[in-house]
Image: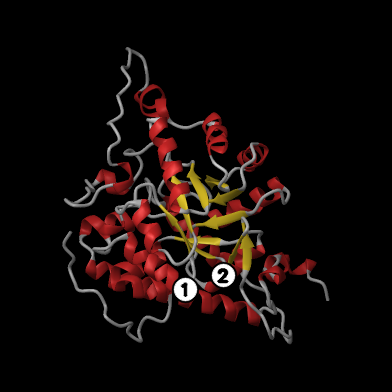
């Protein structure tokens, strides 16, 4: 994998917000890697809406609050975290740095950030766990070979992962994204390391009149029965990623799922899905406090984190921002991205009169100001 420019050895003063990393990442990555990172589905409407929806939300801060002793700590699934910033699963990270996930996990550990490792990582999940200094969750894509899927779950458990995140919103690969349309490819030396040794799935024989989508591609797609099956396989907390409909949220809770992540896959799955932050309140309301709901998609500022928590999220997942940092400056860039967001989160909390995450609620949003108590 060739890169167009060397990694930054120090962070220039011009990088004062996570968005400042984007042009540095673009200069370093070739067109193939950049298209994979910085693209969405179809007309990329949801891709844009994720960020724009946060921009439309306005804060309604409180003044003169005593926030001494404040902190950003929380507990999720029996584990203590110093802040609610998690690294979302991103595939093929050697596209962005020669060490791939091993570089990312170093940066995450420096800021004690939880990291979700992708099934499609370019480094084996065991090697990532061996280098981790903060809790890891494993993101699972169902494979057509269910026995191989079971082995992935067992490998994650054996390696010490703290939770299992099943992505449920992309049953179809290869027909959805801009990078496929313009010929994205994995360069030599980069492969989905966790899938090595899996036999190529047999293609179903289609009869005249059958659909290549319904009867072909979707033949091995997971269903709710598969979620129940995975629930029976593991004692790890089971989290579903890719929930936007409140009916799906209720069904997941009824199945004994431990957590949900409201996500539209960064705008890379079904285009014109709502922005994640727009879908969040209905999902939170649907589960009625039975399980924590996290949010993925569109976070670019510490104030965005506050907005997500104000609408009911327990924590947030970050995707593209830290990947830009990884591409530009390796582990240092990942750590610096997290540092910027955490500091912005603390400043926003302090100026909004919130000493802890528990103090953040919908009254901090301007549209809810009529419900604010004196």
Identified at 39% across, 64% down, the residue is 105
Label 2's element?
A: loop
Residue 83, numbered circle: 2
Q: Quadrant of the C terminus?
A: bottom right
The x, y position of residue 218, in whole percent, is 41, 28
Q: Quadrant of residue 130?
A: bottom left
Q: Residue furthest right?
A: 374
> Could you tell me if residue 203 is visible in this image?
yes
Marks 1/2 in contact by CB < 8 Å: the verdict is yes
Label 1's element?
A: loop
Count the numbered circles shown.
2
The x, y position of residue 26, in whole percent, is 27, 67
Q: Nearer the viewer, residue 141 or 274?
A: 141
Q: Is residue 332 above or below residue 224?
A: below
The colour style of the image is: secondary structure
Residue 139, numbered circle: none
Q: Quadrant of residue 329?
A: bottom left
Q: Quadrant of the N terminus?
A: bottom left
Question: Is 122 displayed left or right of 117 in the figure?
Answer: left
Q: Is residue 340 above or below residue 31?
A: below
The x, y position of residue 60, in whole percent, is 68, 74
Q: Is residue 305 above or below residue 252?
A: below
Q: Is residue 156 above or below residue 98?
A: above
- The residue indicated by pointer 1 is 111
Q: How many neighbours does mark 1 have within 10 angstroms: few (below 14), some (14-19), or many (20 or more)?
A: many
Q: CA distance from mark 1 to mark 2?
A: 9 Å
Identified at 57% across, 33% down, the residue is 228
Q: Nearer the viewer, residue 267 or 68?
A: 68
């Amino acid at each position: 994998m060739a890169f167009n420019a060397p990694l930054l050895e120090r962070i220039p003063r011009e990088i004062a917000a996570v968005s400042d990393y984007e042009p540095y990442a673009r200069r370093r990555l070739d067109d193939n890697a950049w298209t994979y990172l910085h693209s969405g589905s179809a007309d990329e409407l949801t891709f844009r809406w994720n960020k724009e929806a946060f921009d439309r939300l306005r804060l309604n801060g409180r003044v003169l609050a005593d926030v001494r002793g404040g902190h950003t700590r929380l507990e999720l699934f029996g584990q203590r975290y110093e802040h609610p910033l998690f690294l979302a699963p991103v595939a093929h990270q050697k596209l962005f740095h020669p060490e791939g996930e091993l570089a990312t996990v170093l940066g995450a550990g420096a800021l004690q950030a939880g990291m979700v490792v992708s099934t499609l990582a370019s480094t084996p999940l065991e090697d990532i766990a061996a280098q981790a200094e903060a809790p890891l969750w494993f993101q699972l894509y169902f494979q057509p070979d269910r026995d191989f899927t079971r082995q992935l779950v067992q490998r994650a458990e054996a390696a010490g992962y703290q939770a299992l995140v099943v992505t449920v919103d992309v049953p179809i690969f290869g027909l959805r994204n801009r990078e496929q349309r313009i010929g994205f490819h994995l360069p030599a030396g980069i492969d989905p390391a966790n899938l090595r040794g899996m036999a190529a799935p047999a293609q179903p024989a289609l009869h005249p009149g059958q659909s290549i989508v319904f009867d072909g591609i979707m033949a091995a797609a997971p269903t709710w029965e598969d979620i129940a099956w995975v629930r029976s396989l593991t004692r790890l907390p089971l989290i579903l990623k890719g929930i936007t409909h409140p009916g799906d949220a209720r069904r997941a809770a009824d199945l004994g799922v431990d957590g949900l992540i409201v996500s539209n896959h960064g705008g890379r799955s079904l285009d014109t899905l709502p922005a994640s932050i727009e879908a969040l309140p209905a999902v939170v309301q649907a589960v009625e406090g039975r399980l924590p709901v996290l949010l993925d998609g569109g976070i670019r500022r510490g104030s965005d984190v506050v907005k997500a928590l104000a609408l009911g999220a327990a924590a947030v997942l970050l995707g593209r921002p830290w990947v830009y940092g990884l591409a530009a400056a390796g582990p240092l860039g990942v750590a610096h991205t997290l540092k910027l967001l955490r500091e912005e989160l603390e400043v926003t909390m302090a100026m909004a009169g919130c000493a802890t995450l528990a103090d953040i609620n919908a009254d901090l949003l301007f549209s809810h100001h009529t419900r604010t108590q004196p």
